[in-house]
Amino acid sequence: MNGFSIKNWREEDRPREKMLARGSAALTDAELLAILLRTGSRAKSALDIARELLQGAGNSLHNLANYSLDRLTATAGVGDAKAVTLLAAFEAGRRSLIAGKDRDRIIYDARSALEIISPLISHLDHEECWALFLNRSNRIIAKERISSGGTFSTTFDVKIVIKRAVEKLASGIILVHNHPGGNPKPGKMDLLHTEELRKAASVLGITLIDHIIVGGDKFYSFCEEVYGRR
């Protein structure tokens, strides 16, 4: 075993043993990553690699969690297996933030809808469209990904959105999709499809409450900008 192996460290300095003895909250970000990486390379320990990953991400786990597979494997000592483990852990963390918190939650405005959907799409390099289905009290019945597109565009099928809403006995719909380029202003197709959905839903007594487009740290709300509701 080479001298860079964590197994050669004092037991109290090893991340796994430290976690067992003192709990996960006692570990640094790098130590948590080292546990996920499990092993190092010939030249570096798992902790060295973890520190290098963090340094490249501006010492921010949030930034690192948005890395792609290719970007992670660009760091020496991180192969596909290690990168996939990290990506899976980051995704599990994102899902845990929203699990159990959104069902039956009341949506008051665009910002409260974004609190639920933004963690799912804000980090993506492609467009996705999600729907929140609400009851008459604006409580969430369900959320669902409606479509996933390319870097520049995605589209949603009006019939599918309506079908899902009817199946869930929803009274209201809120669509949210992202613009990876950072500009939340709707394009021509966004305007066209949103109006088609609004009209189709109203025939069945379902309200399109809002369609929100997220671009970077900004958003565009059809409710506020087009339909004049707040």
Image: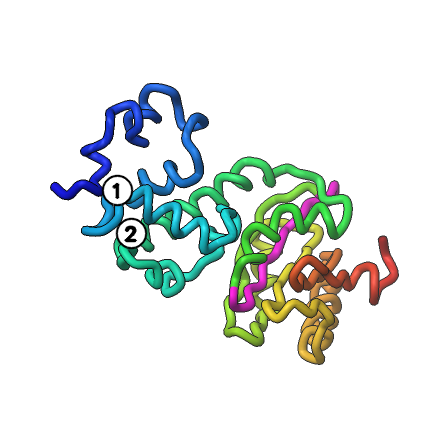
Q: Foreground residue, 221 or 14?
A: 14
Quarter of image, res 199: bottom right
- Residue at point 68% right, 56% down? 174
Residue 55 - label: none
- Residue at point 26% right, 42% down? 38
Estimate the x, y position of residue 171 in percent, counting from the top left.
70, 51
Query: Mark 1 to mark 2: distance in Å?
Result: 8 Å
Farthest residue toward the left? 1
Quarter of image, res 146: bottom right
193 shown above or below 1: below
- Residue at point 56% right, 53% down? 167
Q: Foreground residue, 114 or 229?
A: 114
Q: Foreground residue, 140 or 201?
A: 140
Farthest residue toward the front? 3
Q: Amino acid at mark 2?
A: Lys
Secondary-structure class at tag 2: helix
Q: Give left or right: position of 171 versus 36.
A: right
Q: Give left or right: position of 35 versus 113.
A: left
Image color mode: rainbow
Estimate the x, y position of residue 35 in percent, counting from the top left.
31, 38
17 shown above or below 119: above
* Span of residues in magenta: 125-138
Q: Amino acid at mark 1?
A: Arg
Estimate how packed mark 2 is, as few (under 14), some (14 to 19) or many (20 or more) residues with alpha carbons within 10 Å: some
Quarter of the image with the N terminus in it: top left
**Residues tagged 1 and 2 counted as in contact (Cβ below 8 A):** yes
Disc 1 designates what residue? 38
Disc 2 designates what residue? 82
In the image, residue 126 lies in the stretch drawn in magenta:
yes
